[in-house]
Amino acid sequence: MPTKNLGEDEQLLVSIKPEGLKSIDPIAIQGLYQQEPNRLLFGSTPYLALYNFGKKFYNPEKIDQRMQRLQAKRDEKIKNATTEPAKIARIRDRFNNRLERLQKKKEKGNFVMQLGEPPAIYDSTLMERTMDQIDIYLNSKGYFKHTAEYEKQEKGKRVYITLNITENEPYRYTILDYGIRDEAVLDVVKRASVRSLLKPGDIYDEQVLSEERDRLYNVLRNNGYYDFARAYLEFEPDTSFGGNTVRLRTIVQNPENDSLHRVYTIKNVYFKTDADRFGIPRDTIVYNGVKYVAYDHKYSTKILDKKVDILPSQPYSQLRTSTTQRKLADLDVFQFNNVLYNKVNNPIDSTGNYQLNAFVNAVPSKRYQETTEFGLTYTERRPGPFSSIRLRIRNIFGGAENLDLGLRGSVEGQVNLADVNQTTMIREIGGDIALSFPVILAPFTNKKLLTDYSPRTRIYTGYTDERRQEYERRLYELSLNYIWQKSSRPLQPPTLQYIFSPVNLDISRVKETEFSPEFFNSLIELSRGDSALLASFRSGITPYMSFNVIYNTNDFKQTRNAHYFRTLAEVGGLTKELGLDLSIGDLQTFQFARINPDYRRYIPLGNNRYFAYRFNAGIGSPILSSNVMPYEKYFFAGGASSVRAWRTRRLGPGSYPTFKTDTLNNTTERSFDSEQPGEVLLEGSAEYRFNIFSFLNGAFFVDAGNVWLLKEDTSRPGADFKLNRFYNEIAVGTGFGLRLDFSVMILRFDFATKVYDPAGLPGERFIINDFRFSDFFKQSNQSNLSIGIGYPF
């Protein structure tokens, strides 16, 4: 019983529920609770039970004794190191960190107690404070005539609180005017009023007033008012005219010691790119009015000029200051940068404005940066080690160019394509070189194209050597990419990214003479008329161009109310039509076109709960004289980021089932051994995500989707896409996920089982009843355990 440890007069608070809200978000009300109730799960309090269980092993006296011993040991070590200040500092830091952990353990309990939650002993004074906070909040939202009271219901020693809230009619703005004595300031404010957040008829809202104050502050700071402070801005609401109306006046006070606010312009701009050397003068280069000062000019002034938005004779602007810092940071050649201003001694210029000198200080990053990575990779049968080493060389040609060199290698066990009961070890090694420029390098652009959108030109080449028991394959890659990005508002993180790749060239070399006889025979058997699978194991050359657009308003942990949309379009093999013949030896050339839109939505529900869903679609086809696409350009369904109840790439096509024959026993059964490429993709997922405790999160999910062929294949009935039946061929899976959130990484375990298999026999397609929990830990065609890094979408 969760209440057995309570005192005689104590009660357990298990629920606070707001009722009657129509316009106000209940999540906002929940954030005002001065006392959080214990969480219920199916009528029980498991988190409280976990806390009480951990408390059995909690001994604060022992923790105090450990802290005293640590303090004595620390003092002794410091005493013995009196002549070594650096050593003393290290000792103090090491012991203090341990003492802080013990103090936290004493205050919050042991590890098990921290996984749970302490009893929420009902406190009527905290409930009254909650009601006070609700009144304050509703008034701040314009509901001055609201009513709010709470109702307490007792069930044994449990307390359930219902908040009865009636919003009533809100107050709205009827007149908006100004109280600004400085005519120049009034003129700037009025010119910017088209972007005001306040409109007649809007509901009075103190949060919006705060945002409007910030907007006006930024407007004035971006128009030369260097000394302007938020304290000069205030709002004066008047509700005395009745009728739920507000007359609002925007007031800008004058400085205490001056009758007007001063406007500043930039006199000189100095750009410093190296550390000071006492007593040694720097060399100065003047370019476009900016004075670049350095002992050794290692960075092209033409490139830096495109990143500096502050110029002489401009009015001071906080926006241009911040965009300069952001653009310099995006170069990734400076470890740190800032912009400082000094007022000029003889401040007034010919226009009557006061003057500033701007100092841009940029501290160079290390020229060489090495990154090494080790780990395990797992796809199907047996995990194996992987390793990579990367080297970045910054500012390699003096124009803020960055050169990246990489080497990688891995070993992994996967299904043997000749005998699915055996595991074959795959060895893969590779390397790549990428050179990026901080401008768009294209004809007739003069390197000024898209300068406000952090442009980059990236040239990439890579090599991969894959060797497995059945065959060997080598892949050569070359690409030219133009990348730029936009933000919804200045100084906000970019939400829109464009990647245009006019040149992509993939060359695949396969040694067919080294195919094992068993593998070659199984390849023909698995193909069953599918030319795409056969073509994927032949040497080929694929020239193509692509355009990728990504819109994303979420963060890394996906905690915002956000949208994500990505569209990738590719067209390949047009070089012949453009008069360029890339035929090399026995390499086949592919001609194709494909597009892949992907939409995702993330909705916070409060208390670390989220609802997320996704729609992913695609269509691709060989074009012109080609009758097959490159294998990598086909669509696949199934796997950790797709329909999770199916193994990776094993779902589809359509309602066509793949079988295999056991010649020894003369039996035939469903086979999920071979990958199933398709030319049409439709899939969707929905997840309810929630926190279980501490760093462990959970999710319930449903996935649906499939792939199809565009044209009918008589050898595979039901594999093609038809409008009159595709909806009956949508596979469905469901399951539960565990996610370990380590802040810098999310480790995901998704347990999924099949609900509807469109390739099953008529009357036997709903197969949820075949679920067995043990299927997750063995090779099963009913259920699947997916392990991944990050969220599935």
Image: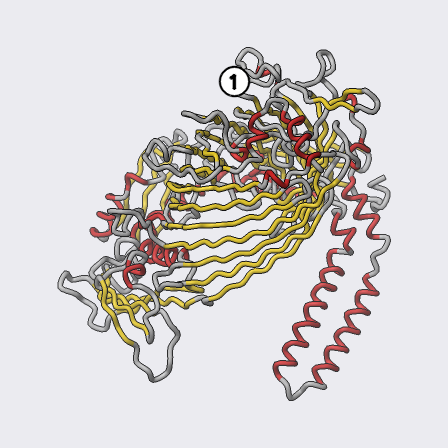
Residue that mark 1 sits on: 711
- Considering depth in this image, is 102 or 125 the residue closer to the camera? 102
Q: Position of residue 690 (x, y in %)?
A: 66, 38
Tell me, yes or no, if residue 735 can be seen here: yes
Q: Quadrant of the N terminus?
A: top right
Q: Quadrant of the C terminus?
A: top right
- Considering depth in this image, is 534 or 685 the residue closer to the camera? 534
Q: Mark 1 Cα within 10 Å, few/some/many (few <14, many 20+)? A: few
Task: Describe residue 2's horizontal placement relative to residue 320 as left or right.
Answer: right
Total numbered badges shown on the rendered structure: 1
* Residue found at the far left of this picture: 350
Q: Position of residue 195 (x, y in %)?
A: 31, 40
Q: Position of residue 264 (x, y in %)?
A: 24, 61
Residue at 62% from the left image edge and 28% from the top image edge: 676
Residue at 63% from the left image edge and 26% from the top image edge: 527
Task: Describe residue 761's horizontal placement relative to residue 277 as left or right.
Answer: right
Q: Quadrant of residue 575?
A: top left
Tell me, yes or no, if residue 546 can be seen here: no
Residue at 33% from the left image edge and 52% from the top image edge: 439
Residue type indicated by callout 1? Lys
Q: Quadrant of residue 367?
A: bottom left
- Considering depth in this image, is 519 or 165 the residue closer to the camera? 519
Task: Describe residue 321's horizontal placement relative to residue 415 as left or right.
Answer: left
Q: Quadrant of residue 28?
A: top right
Check the image and report above or below for 185 versus 572. Answer: below
Task: Describe residue 555's horizontal placement relative to residue 110 as left or right.
Answer: left
Helix, strand or loop at mark 1 = loop
Q: Position of residue 789 (x, y in %)?
A: 63, 45
